[in-house]
């Protein structure tokens, strides 16, 4: 199933930020639409990046930024893992593409619930960046997911021809 989120072009800043992030989430999921389990795990670059791995990594980013940094949830309680870097792209052999999509969707939904409790200017401290606000998190994750959706599109094109 291909996800389609309408493009919101007017309205309050928060509505635009949330809509853009949701569109990028959907586009990231769309990059694996129609791929087989084998194709989704196919590695075509030197890094551990695979189509399914991009979704796994995105779920980790959701948990780190929204649950841990914004919500203050200890990493050990975020569920599904918060290991950053190349390890965040690794998918266990027993996880299916449907499992990883569902994991990403659950993490995204939890992010929405946590973010709803904060104003755009509410500030939290990131261990390496210092003070960040919700607005920054929305922009950072939107940028990250858009970039990874582009990576996924290229991988899909290489896989499907």
Image (spheres, rainbow, N blue to C red):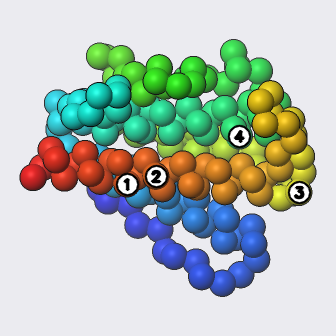
Count numbered badges in the picture: 4
Q: Is residue 94 above or below residue 97?
A: above
Residue denoted by label 1:
150
Q: Is residue 94 above or below residue 116?
A: above
Residue denoted by label 4:
66
Q: Nearer the viewer, mark 4 or mark 1?
A: 1
Q: Residues within 10 Å of mark 4 (few under 14, many from 20)?
A: many
Q: Residues within 10 Å of mark 1 (few under 14, many from 20)?
A: some
Q: Secondary structure at mark 3?
A: loop
Image spot of residue 145 (x, y percent): 50, 50
Q: Quadrant of the N terminus?
A: bottom left
Labels 4 and 2: the sequence-earlier one: 4
**On the image, which quarter does residue 120 sit in?**
bottom right
Residue denoted by label 3:
121
Q: Nearer the viewer, mark 4 or mark 3?
A: 3
Q: Nearer the viewer, mark 2 or mark 3?
A: 2
Image spot of residue 38 (x, y percent): 17, 30
Does the residue at mark 1 contact the one at mark 2 (Cβ under 8 Å)? Answer: yes
């Amino acid at each position: 199933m291909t996800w389609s989120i309408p493009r919101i072009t007017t309205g309050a800043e928060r509505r635009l930020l949330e809509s853009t992030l949701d569109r990028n989430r959907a586009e990231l999921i769309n990059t694996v639409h129609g791929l087989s389990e084998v194709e989704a795990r196919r590695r075509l670059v030197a890094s551990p990046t695979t189509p399914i791995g991009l979704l796994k990594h995105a779920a980790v980013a959701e948990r780190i930024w929204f649950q841990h940094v914004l919500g203050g949830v200890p990493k050990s309680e975020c569920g599904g893992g918060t290991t950053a870097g190349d390890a965040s792209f690794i998918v266990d052999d027993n996880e299916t593409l449907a499992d990883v999509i569902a994991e990403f969707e659950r993490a995204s939904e939890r992010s929405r619930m946590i973010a709803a409790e904060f104003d755009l200017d509410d500030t939290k401290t990131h261990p390496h960046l210092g003070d960040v606000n919700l607005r920054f998190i929305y922009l950072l994750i939107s940028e990250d997911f858009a970039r990874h959706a582009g990576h996924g599109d290229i991988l899909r094109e290489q896989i499907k021809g």
